[in-house]
Amino acid sequence: MHRYGEPPAGRWAAPGRVNLIGEHTDYNDGFVLPFALPLRTVVAAAPQDDGRWTVGSELSDCPVEFGADEVAAPGRVTGWGAYVAGVVWALRDAGHHVPGARLAIASDVPLGSGLSSSAALEAAVLAALVDLGGVDLPAERRPRLAQRAENTYVGAPTGIMDQAAVIRCRAGHALFLDCRTEAVEHVPFDLAAAGLAVLVVDSRAPHRHADGEYASRRASCEQAAELLGVAALRDVPAAGLDEALARLDGDEIRRRVRHVVTEDQRVLDTVELLRAGRIRDIGPLLTASHASMRDDFEITVPEIDTAVEAALAAGAYGARMTGGGFGGCVLALVDADRSDAVADAVTTAYAGRGFHAPNFHLAAPAPATHRLP
């Protein structure tokens, strides 16, 4: 913690995540299949005796400082510091003692790219404060607490997937998560053994009305569930989709429901293929997921659609947007020795459309949040 002139008591790392498939299903009590990325946020921390919290980030010249009074109610700490204050608030609200601390944050998870930089920050801060305070908080209970920090304190209506992924994923596996029961299965996802790679394309598209549109999609889903008399859209079976759609008035709400119900089924189908070691065969499911997000949920933008189309034309087995939408990233399942060629094809397509050049990452399932040696 050189910015504070003293060594830290420890360092904690939390990864970004990419969602292989299962978009906007989490807040519908459905199924998702993320995996953790090698990209990560690292928090160095040490106790602070005055009972306050001082937070510095390499992305900001101005540290954020707050005490118990400022963190007592949502809205008192704003900006990026709200994610840290939200974790302190959620821990205290759950009855845990949270010691004052100095924290220094560094990250290579791109901001605003749909790779869950906010959940990585929350998880790393949570791990640091839990260890510093000797808090008894098992890993399986941490995602809900981190989610509450983001939902209630920050005010972002996210589901449980991001926090569960960065806290509970395992290297070499995708995390099959039931967002209702929080049951997990670590599904083998050994890309290297299959001669494959997941190419992540950071579209660099500016997020267009993402917050309001995300909230609007969630409200539509909740309205549809109420009209259909179910607790959540997860309870509409794929076999009963047509019957459910016939009970709804309006094309837009029908399309929203169709996306969620079919996306849940695509997650289940993908898991079955991965259990059988048939990684290449998930490609069409990825592409179908993208078409559903584009046409039924209407959350893609031209840069995203261009990246998907170019990757498929260059030989990707499947490609889809990943994340909440209206910008962010695309993932493409490719032969490992074709990743550069696919990236070049996407870059060329972007240039032809006059878009800013995209950035690329190769994604392999990495470890979840942990304390560094």
Image: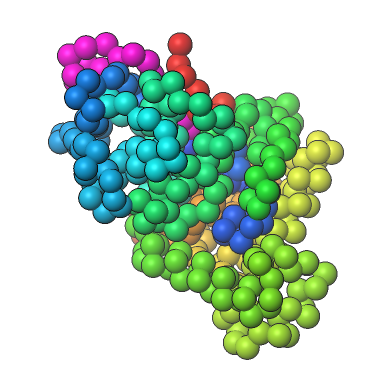
Left or right: 6 as drawn, with respect to 264: left
Residue 201 shows in this picture: no
On the image, the x and y values in percent for residue 362 come to 53, 34
Q: Tell me what residue is drawn at x 52 percent, y 44 percent.
A: 144
Outermost residue on the front side: it is: 95
**The image quarter in which residue 225 lies:** bottom right
Viewer-nearest residue: 351 or 170:
170
Q: Tell me what residue is drawn at x 54 percent, y 74 percent.
A: 220
Q: Is residue 92 above or below residue 133?
A: below
In the picture, the quarter occupied by the N terminus is: top left
On the image, the x and y values in percent for residue 66 come to 20, 37
Viewer-nearest residue: 204 or 373:
373
Q: Tell me what residue is drawn at x 42 percent, y 33 percent.
A: 96
Outermost residue on the bottom side: it is: 249
Residue 234 shows in this picture: yes
Q: Tell me what residue is drawn at x 45 percent, y 16 percent.
A: 372
166 in the magenta segment? no
The structure's colour scheme is rainbow
**The image quarter in which residue 22 lies:** bottom right
In the picture, the quarter occupied by the C terminus is: top left
Left or right: 136 as drawn, with respect to 241: left
**The image quarter in which residue 51 lies:** top left
Viewer-nearest residue: 351 or 10:
10
The residue range painted magenta reads 1-15
Number of labels in the image equals 0
Left or right: 165 as drawn, with respect to 47: right
Q: Is residue 110 above or below residue 351?
A: above
6 in the magenta segment? yes
